[in-house]
Amino acid sequence: MSVRFLTALPVYNEESHIAEVLARVREYSQDILVVNDGSKDGTTEALAAETGIQVITHPRNLGYGAALRTAFQFAIEQNYDALVTIDCDGQHEPRLIPEIVAALDRDGEEWDIVSGSRYLTQFPGDSLPPADRRRINAQITRELNELLGLQLTDTFCGFKAYRVEALKHFEITELGYAMPLQVWVQAVAHNLRITEFPVPLVYLEEERSFGGSLDDARRRLAYYHEVIDRELAAANLPTLSTLDSHEGRERLE
């Protein structure tokens, strides 16, 4: 059965990447949405030169999670079967879009979320991730697996496919980079079916900023923990304090 899917790109100040990335995405996706999250560089002008795509613009920068929330709402309102999210910084490979959509129905199973993982399989030419990002990803992934009974290998990859019917379960209030943590907790709370999909590990801009205090790795980790605990408590699930590693969880392991 043919799946009608939308590919959505959250964009903030991506003037240097937008034209090239969109050209590649067009090869593999008929329907494209760009959520321009208050860009202040030439991104808005570059998008005005593009045809055949949908653009939603936030008048001011609201955050990565806010851009994805807008994409979720659009996919629901337009009655798509599936939504693919892909970052616009050149780190994801658009050629994999059809494969990640197809993986929603794989091995005789119907999945609600197919999440890209940069650590599930090693590809030739893989980048080395920034050390603090890898450590935090590994720690958060381990903690979520223990708390939620998941088997994730990459908590933060932005390349995903969602069954749109499943998107209706999410209440996204985390508007920044911690939004994926809210998704994982709510997905488990609603018994959504989750699997991973191997994608290459590519870092083109290792020094890209998270913004403000989140550029400090320890503060970023503490922020992620606050979000996880808040979501777990809202879902009446055990919080991070139940883990044996709780006393040492402020360390970058």
Image: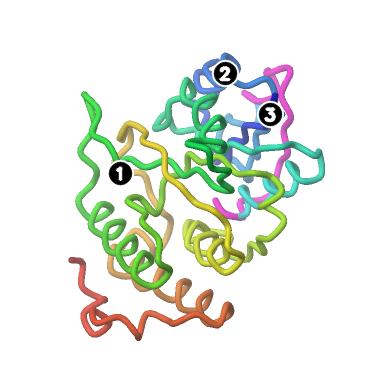
First in sequence: mark 3 vs mark 2:
3
Q: Quadrant of the C terminus?
A: bottom left
Q: Does the magenta stretch include residue 88?
A: no
Q: Is residue 59 magenta?
A: yes
Residue occupying the point 36% across, 44% down: 208
Report whether 76 appears left or right of 239.
right
Task: Report crowding for label 1: few under 14, some 14 to 19, many 20 or more residues within 10 A (C-alpha).
Answer: few
Judging by the rendered image, the residue that carries numbered circle 2 is 28
Q: Position of residue 24 (x, y in %)?
A: 52, 17
Point out which mark residue 3 bears: 3
Task: Report crowding for label 3: few under 14, some 14 to 19, many 20 or more residues within 10 A (C-alpha).
Answer: few
Residue 11 at least partly seen:
no
**Element on which disc 1 rests:** loop
First in sequence: mark 1 vs mark 3:
3
Q: Where is residue 157 in the image (x, y as percent from the top left)?
A: 42, 45
**Element on which disc 2 rests:** loop
**Element on which disc 3 rests:** loop
Task: Report crowding for label 2: few under 14, some 14 to 19, many 20 or more residues within 10 A (C-alpha).
Answer: some
Please give the range of residues in magenta. Answer: 46-65
How far is mark 1 from mark 2, CA to CA?
29 Å
Whether 31 is drawn above or below 119: the answer is: above
Amino acid bearing label 1: Glu
